[in-house]
Amino acid sequence: MGVDDKFQEFVAFVKLQYPNKDFIGLHEPVFIGNERKYVMDAIDSTFVSSVGAYVNRFEEMMAQITGAKYAIAIVNGTNALHMALLLNHVTIGDEVLSQALTFIATANAISYIGARPVFIDVDKDTLGMSPISLKDFLTEYGERRDNGFTYNKLTGKKIAACVPMHTFGLPCRIDEIALICEEWGIPLIEDAAESLGSYYKDKHTGVFGKVGVFSFNGNKTVTCGGGGALITDDETIAKRAKHLTTQAKVPHKWEFVHDEIGYNYRMPNLNAALACAQLEQLGLFVKNKRVLAGKYNELSGKLGISFSKETLYSKSNYWLNSLILDNFDERNYFLEFTNSRGVMTRPVWELMNRLPMFGTCQTDNLENSIWLADRVVNVPSGFRT
Ligand SMILES: *Cc1c(COP(=O)(O)O)cnc(C)c1O
């Protein structure tokens, strides 16, 4: 089968999944539950801002869904990451281990602190941080000092946190990563922005380290326009998260006293109302997406294209389905072929170390990241009615 025939069959398949559409997007939100009802209710209550019943309910739902003891509502995922780093005492001049293959928000949040990311390679199958690469990097550059912290032998900087990411909802080998971080005394923060509804060894992603972070942006599995959440089992961290995200105001009947520099990072009740209605449908959304992923898997097998599947012990939400094409030229031809026929497809993000802001950051050899960056594309993955 020639490349044109393969890609034509692919386009026809996608159009069959999303009938009666001129243009098929990558991931469009659907509001088919209690969204209108809850948003109207929030408006009628006049509690539209960051105090309100839906914010509390959202936090309860997130704790229940993930199995974490505490969940804190945040304005968006990027700020939730920023907060997670602050809560783990990452500070100016520190280094944070992360991935080159990730969305910009991960590296940006590290930069807000005045810390620098160090980019570790990913695994080819999970597209997330490779525990082997992490271990190799720490064996070569890590130095555990008497104060319990690990420093980078090359730069002399403290390695203050590790932030792996569950790419497109596919869980990375997070239990192995957690063990390595524990061995080196490095706090683990999971960027689970894309993996709400994804599990590893029967535990929800985001619960393996100190703090897990989620996003509810418009393109995510569950959206509330803009929103984020932070989960943790640590009561001290949870209390401090609530305090820091609400301008570090000391509770009092009327006095305005703040005991440190705080942030206006709490999710508004209006967004939380939308989030609650969407979270009620998480099971439905994930089920729908997993059926589609199964179909993509079958089709790509038939067409001889590689499809990124969940690995052993993991259950993916298949937020965005991804294909791995044979080479860079074929990837570009695929993007041209599909986008010009009304089917939106996108390449994976440019590697972080190739962006001007992060060009001088330390990396390992990034062998798999570089290989994947030339080949991975996302294909339409939204809810099918
Ligand atoms: C979406 C996303 C975020 C956070 O995004 P917000 O738009 O700020 O909610 C963070 N990390 C990753 C990997 C993401 O995909």
Image (cartoon, grey):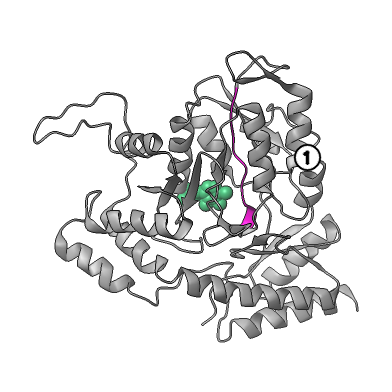
Q: Which residue is drawn at 25% across and 48% down?
A: 50
Name the side, left or right, on which 143 lies relative to 83.
right
* Residue 63 vertical position relative to residue 248 in the rendered view, above or below: below
How far across and down, in percent of the image, does residue 229 sit?
42, 49
Residue beneath label 1, please? 132
Quadrant containing the N terminus is bottom right
Q: Which of 258 and 176 is in front in this view?
A: 176
Q: Can residue 65 be seen in this view?
A: yes
Identify the element where label 1 is drawn. Answer: helix
Question: Magenta residues?
Answer: 159-168
How far across and down, in percent of the image, does residue 29 sit?
47, 69
Q: Residue at x 71, y 27 (%)?
A: 362
Q: Residues within 10 Å of mark 1 (few under 14, many from 20)?
A: some
Name the residue type under label 1: Ile
How far across and down, in percent of the image, does residue 168 sit?
62, 58
Query: In the displayed image of the protein, which residue is found farthest to the left?
Result: 254
